[in-house]
Image (tube, rainbow, N blue to C red):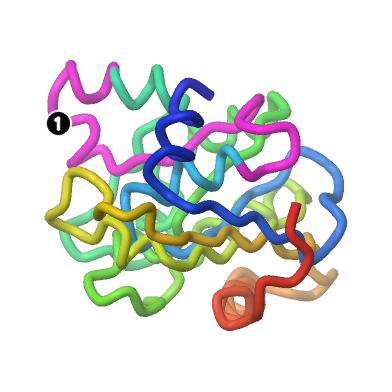
Amino acid sequence: MILKPLLSATLRISVCRHGAPGPSPVVVAANHASHLDTPLILQALPGGPRRTAVGAAADYFYASRLRSAGVRLLFNTFPVRRPARPTGPRAAHGDRADADRLLTAGWNLLLFPEGTRSRDGLLGDFRRGAAALCLRHGVPCLPVGVTGTHHAMPRGRRWPRPGRPPVVVHLGAPLTPAPAEDAQAFTGRVAAAVRALIACPLGEQQ
């Protein structure tokens, strides 16, 4: 990733793996507190950003041709069409056709089920879209917890704070929906896993 040297120069990055990577494709579900989350998670995933597409808010990242071209080039994004106040499955995974097409083609998807960046760094409610994708396609969900990014570059900042603040990416063990589990129940399990990753110690660093 072309951003990797820049991230390493401005942040102290730790990656902690808390389970085996599991099969591919997967839906990666992560907390969201900063614009730093996406590049850090892509860098930390097994195999790096290859064959991983990122759901990006259409109303923000696709509001101009220049910005949309930039995020497509840097992060291989597809637009997430979210309402002003995200509710229901569409707010979590955005354009269903794009997500379905990418998963069918074997791509991993990186999604932020909170629907937007946290304003206070705390974990918000998870929407059901990521879980629904897993159920519909029979693929696992990889929970990811990211800590330190809200302090390093919260909303309103365009560059990380000076002093190379520490950030940690926790990669969890893949979760597979149970045979009778619905999207709401699976969402609860995914959210609990992400919450546990955020709260856990560093663990095994890679």
| Image position of 42 (left or right of 167) | right
Where residue 199 sits, quadrant-wise, is: bottom right
Q: Which residue is mark 1?
A: 63
The secondary element bearing badge 1 is classed as loop
Determine if the magenta segment contains residue 64.
yes
Q: Residue at x 58, y 36 (%)?
A: 100
- 119 is within the stretch colored magenta: no
Residue 141 visible from this viewpoint: yes
The residue at the point 58 percent across, 41 percent down is: 109
Residue 23 in the image: above or below residue 113: above
- 76 and 80: which one is in front? 76
206 displayed left or right of 190: right
Q: Is residue 175 visible?
A: no
Percent from the top left, x then y, of residue 176?
80, 63
Report the span colored magenta: 44-69
Residue at 22 percent across and 30 percent down: it is 62
